[in-house]
Image (spheres, rainbow, N blue to C red):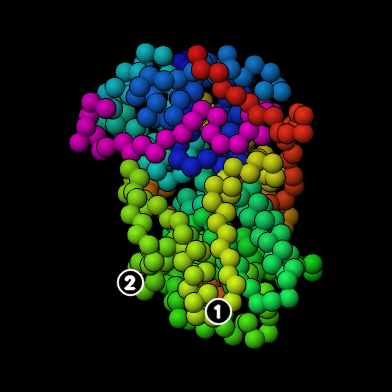
Amino acid sequence: MGNIIVGQSGGPTAVINSSLAGVFKSGKENGLKVYGMINGIQGLLEERYVELNKQIETDLDIELLKRTPSAYLGSCRFKLPNMEEDEQIYEKIFSILDKINVDKFFYIGGNDSMDTIKKLHTYGTAKNKNIQFIGVPKTIDNDLAVTDHTPGFGSACKYIATTVKEIIKDATVYDAKNITIIEIMGRNAGWLTGAAAITKSEDCSGVDLIYLPEVVFDIEKFVSKVRKLQKTKKSLVIAISEGIKNKNGVNICELEEENTLLDCFGHKSLSGTANNLARILHRKLGCKTRAIELNTTQRCASHFMSEVDINESFLAGAYAVSIALNGENGKVVIFERTSNSPYNIVMKSHNVYDIANVEKKVPLEWIDTENGTVSKELIEYIKPLIQGEVYPIMVDGLPKHLKLERQ
């Protein structure tokens, strides 16, 4: 039996390292040498990798790793070309894997990462390479197809809902009309913004309006709704997805300032949506407006992660190793929810070809466009995922994290 290698790709989450810990611990317990790619597939192409057995040596190291934010191994946004376009790059990857006797390859990531798994599996199958490729799901955006939800989503929701609830409290301090617009991550899928709805409870009135990118955003109707709400409520808090667009498909963040930065996957940088809307409301309504962009804090806030999320993430990594040891290839770990109350999931494997490059959006029936809110089904879907707390291991008043030592 050969060695295994694991990498992380795309935007980090609060629990991505918990999945890494699951892969590592399961591999080690099965007597395997575990390599880690530095900066994902891009780093592997430059032969940058470490032997994790020499980095993570104790049970405390594993617990620290599970609680460490960002991607312990480093990440990348690197798009593999199709093998017809550049066969040499695939030959280089497989020769590097052969060099360190790797026959099991694990990649922790979202849609673009599953595209990498799909392409490597396709090439390996075509060339009769004896290497297994397994995807471990990760994304706060929760937009990965087939699986009920993705590791990282629950902790991001917990952070967002907590922060929004605190912002709502702060917004009511002064006895004057004011509008706070909170910009939440979500390019094409509004799962994260939907988490703002769970703030409504006996001690909190909740957000006043919610806008997701799955439906067209009409600025005039938006202003009209806000004006109407101001007649009965002085302080308004509105949650919007960064990727909301008008009827012409133009991002709201581009309406008042140019924004054309693209990554290697062709994804446009989205930022400034809340700022643009705050300026528009100030001009039209004449009251104080404030824009708050949660930005990367949504994915790196490991000090307040969900216990459900961190446990599921760890188990997903371990499950990936188990299906590889059972001979599976070209698969992705998925969650299937069997019960909402009490909450329960089972883990399964699914063909990567049904998942890579397929985007899962919030069902339209879960979005109440007329009233600017979401349905109870979306709230009930999210709530089980934010339960429980896992606190950092503190040293001198601050969280302690596991640091990678480059070899």
Q: Are marks 1 and 2 in contact (CB under 8 Å)?
A: no
How far, Cα to Cα, is label 1 from label 2? Answer: 27 Å
Label 2: few (<14), some or many (≥20) within 10 Å?
few
Is 198 inside the magenta-drawn segment?
no
Whether residue 159 is visible to the viewer of this picture, yes or no, is yes
**Three-letter amino acid code of the residue under disc 1:** Gly
Q: Residue at x 69, y 29 (%)?
A: 400
Q: Which residues are magenta?
A: 62-89
Above-or-below relation of 58 to 170 = above
Front one among 378 and 121: 378
**Three-letter amino acid code of the residue under disc 2:** Asn
Residue 249 x, y percent position in the rendering: 35, 68
Q: Residue at x 39, y 36 (%)?
A: 117
Whether residue 336 is visible to the viewer of this picture, yes or no, is no
Observer-side mark, 1 or 2, equals 1
Q: Residue at x 64, y 66 (%)?
A: 197
Residue 401 x, y percent position in the rendering: 65, 29
Question: What residue would you read off at disc 2?
Answer: 248
Residue 59 sits in quarter: top right
Is most of the magenta stretch helix, strand or loop? Answer: loop
Numbered circle sitting on residue 286: 1
